[in-house]
């Protein structure tokens, strides 16, 4: 039986869903000869860690308690230490993670799983790679930060997986890595990688007003609390950067041409969110409507896409053939079209749900298991 | 630097393309820390093997010579032994492969790559798994044979890859394995997995006569020399069986309901191929035309698909919604729709070229590299 020791960073929706998947898949994985041993879990402030990481782990009862506490909106700091586990608060929590990485990384192996959405883990990740740890990321930040950070964290490509950084659990990264490792040069990627913006564009295409669609999407919880976090294109740009770097582009976020749905004078630093929703948004309707009409008269659909081609990496609104996979896209599905030597006339198309905690956590779990051969 | 030793079985289009990819990707793989060492190559009759498999390999000049000989339609038996390599003919060739597997399998590691299309390798594959070898298959036969053979060859799922058995290099198997390993239960697979039949159905949909489309496809080299090898559905059934077994179905080929395009009295044992093309085929036009019309009046498209659902595994002509990925399929692309807990409203869709030596060999090479962590 292989044993993979894990520390899960981030106890938001994805982290908790991952813990749930780990607990509920124990017998499935045992049948395949793998045991997942969660030795630590941390949120933004605290770390809960097994007292002896060599011999102990956070058992299922403890993991369910973590789930209960975090689902109630409490901090891990509210849990008290016992003989079986300890609670550390920042900055001791970070030092303790490095300690555990030193103990387990090179001997028994340890995978650090970053399910957070912050840049705070980058420092830890850069240290643990030198300690022999494996890394699994749902968090886009560590790979969309500086090239120096990227190179450090990505130092050994066999010891890192990050499927859920792009398209949630959709097998985008795994498929691209297969193509690249076979020596098939990828010469074009074009994709709709935001379920939110995919939904918005397909509703607007159906004749609804842009401002109304965005408000509905916000009310349904499809957007971030401030929809401008989606409409800025920054989230899509981070995904585009990760894909471009996989293809070997030596670029940073600021090299990407990013088209925002709103002008600078409607930005978060200028206009409060309620003002934007009530007064800003409707001013954008006419422009989008005109673009949709123009696209339609050209036999095209309007999509918000990332495009990586030659030395360009761009994110913005584009007209695409109605008959292409991207043009036919409906609802919140993600789509990626990949062109290469093998896929030249027709692209390789990957399509499906590109968001949701369940799917995202499933992608993380598949990544963890994909590295099992590195564990004793 | 990791070193992966290989024996390539089968010197048809896929095997030769694989050898070409290996030679032309040497620097790419060296940059990623991997060296592929081809110690043996065999065709249906002979084995060409390095004289000392511990220290020697078939160098690039020798591999290019293999390519030249086989492209000319000659046998490896026409090559003569030298100090650097030996040529063995059947049945000594088989014994020699087992010898090499015994020497390398458990010490340095050895991957046996089956790029043939015959059942002859099954015996060898069943022996080498016990000798610690890894297996990569483009050949469908070993996994669509008896359950006993399947269980033996698939004994350790970490030591076998077979992406190119279904959909050529399309990441079908890799994606399904990711979904299954994450504990996401796949409850429905439906796919068009024959480029030939996909082409035929989409041309017939455009108003052409079935018999004419099949004849054109044969003349373009899209079909097997006897098009009934495609039209019987047997090739698709083998792919369906491999997918079903991945999902845990304990079935054999004869449990699959297979719909053939032609009746038994037009079969190869009754009617010579030229007779079938001239006189048999046109008798089938009316039925296909009626089915297309019926589908169209229902708002559907007619496709030849594999369907795996509940405990059923079927292969045949089905009506599918025109708006689905399968219904929109044009030309010879393969499409697979996967439904699971994570992909329930909308399926995960994988689409792209599902045939061709280049793509198939690229899938094999990606499989080989995917197992590199098992090598010292």
Image (tube, coloured by chain):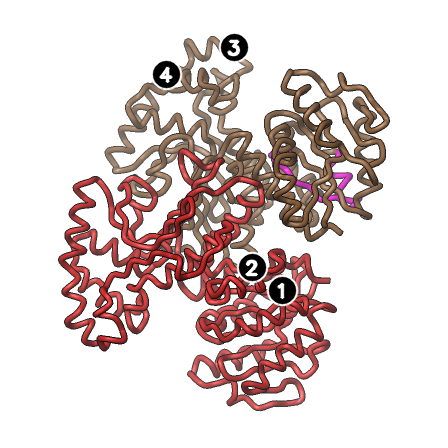
Chain colours: A red, B brown
Residue A317: x, y in percent?
Answer: 27, 53
Residue under label 2, please give it: A161
A61 lies left or right of A268: right
Q: Could you give the CA–CA distance between mark 3 and mark 1, rounded to whole angstroms?
A: 60 Å
- Magenta segment, which residues? B124-141
Q: Could you give the CA–CA distance between mark 1 and mark 4, rounded to whole angstroms?
A: 57 Å
Residue under label 1, please give it: A134
* Residue in front for this viewpoint, B141 or B219: B219
Residue B255: x, y in percent?
Answer: 55, 37
Label 4 chain ID: B
Q: Are marks 3 and 4 in contact (CB under 8 Å)?
A: no
Residue under label 3, please give it: B272
Figure quadrant of residue B130? top right
Crowd rating for badge 1 (residues with CA inside 10 Å; few <14, some 14–19, many 20+): many
Residue under label 4, please give it: B212
Say how many tags the image has: 4
Q: Secondary structure at mark 4?
A: helix
Considering only vertical position in the picture, is A66 above or below A136? Answer: below
Q: Residue at x 80, y 27 (%)?
A: B93
Q: Could you give the CA–CA distance between mark 1 and mark 2, rounded to whole angstroms?
A: 8 Å
B122 lies left or right of B205: right
* Between marks 4 and 2 in the image, the one whose residue lies nearer the viewer: 2
Crowd rating for badge 2 (residues with CA inside 10 Å; few <14, some 14–19, many 20+): many
* Between marks 3 and 2 in the image, the one whose residue lies nearer the viewer: 2
Report whether residue B341 is seen: no
Q: Could you give the CA–CA distance between mark 3 and mark 4, rounded to whole angstroms?
A: 18 Å
A332 lies left or right of B179: left
* Between marks 1 and 4 in the image, the one whose residue lies nearer the viewer: 1
Q: Is residue B136 magenta?
A: yes
């Amino acid at each position: 039986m292989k044993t993979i020791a894990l520390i899960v960073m981030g106890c938001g929706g994805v982290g908790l869903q991952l813990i749930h998947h780990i607990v509920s898949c124990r017998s499935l994985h045992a049948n395949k000869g793998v045991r997942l041993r969660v030795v630590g879990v941390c949120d933004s402030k605290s770390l809960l860690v097994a007292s002896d990481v060599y011999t102990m782990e956070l058992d299922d009862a403890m993991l369910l308690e973590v789930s209960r506490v975090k689902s109630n909106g409490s901090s891990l700091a509210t849990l008290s230490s016992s003989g079986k586990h300890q609670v550390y608060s920042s900055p001791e929590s970070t030092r303790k993670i490095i300690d555990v990485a030193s103990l387990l990384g090179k001997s028994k192996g340890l995978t650090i799983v970053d399910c957070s959405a912050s840049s705070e883990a980058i420092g830890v990740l850069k240290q643990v790679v030198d300690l022999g740890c494996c890394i699994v990321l749902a968090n886009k930040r560590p790979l969309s930060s500086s090239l120096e950070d990227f190179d450090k964290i990505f130092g050994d490509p066999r010891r890192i997986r990050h499927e859920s950084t792009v398209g949630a659990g959709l097998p985008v990264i795994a498929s691209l890595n297969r193509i690249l490792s076979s020596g098939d040069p990828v010469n074009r990627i074009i994709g709709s990688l935001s379920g939110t913006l995919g939904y918005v564009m397909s509703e607007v295409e159906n004749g609804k007003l842009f401002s109304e669609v965005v408000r509905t999407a916000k009310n349904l919880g499809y957007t971030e609390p401030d929809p401008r976090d989606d409409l800025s294109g920054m989230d899509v740009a981070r995904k585009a950067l990760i894909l471009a770097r996989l293809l070997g582009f030596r670029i940073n976020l600021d090299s990407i041409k990013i088209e925002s749905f709103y002008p600078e004078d409607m930005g978060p630093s200028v206009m409060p969110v309620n003002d934007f929703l009530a007064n800003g948004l409707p001013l954008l309707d006419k422009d989008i409507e005109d673009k949709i009409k123009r696209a339609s008269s050209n036999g095209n659909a309007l999509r918000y896409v990332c495009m990586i081609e030659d030395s360009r990496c761009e994110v913005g609104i584009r007209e695409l053939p109605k008959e292409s996979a991207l043009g036919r896209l409906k609802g919140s599905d993600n789509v990626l079209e990949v062109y290469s030597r093998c896929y030249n006339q027709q692209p390789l198309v990957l399509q499906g749900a590109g968001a949701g905690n369940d799917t995202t956590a499933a992608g993380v779990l598949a990544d963890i298991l994909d590295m099992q051969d590195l564990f004793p």
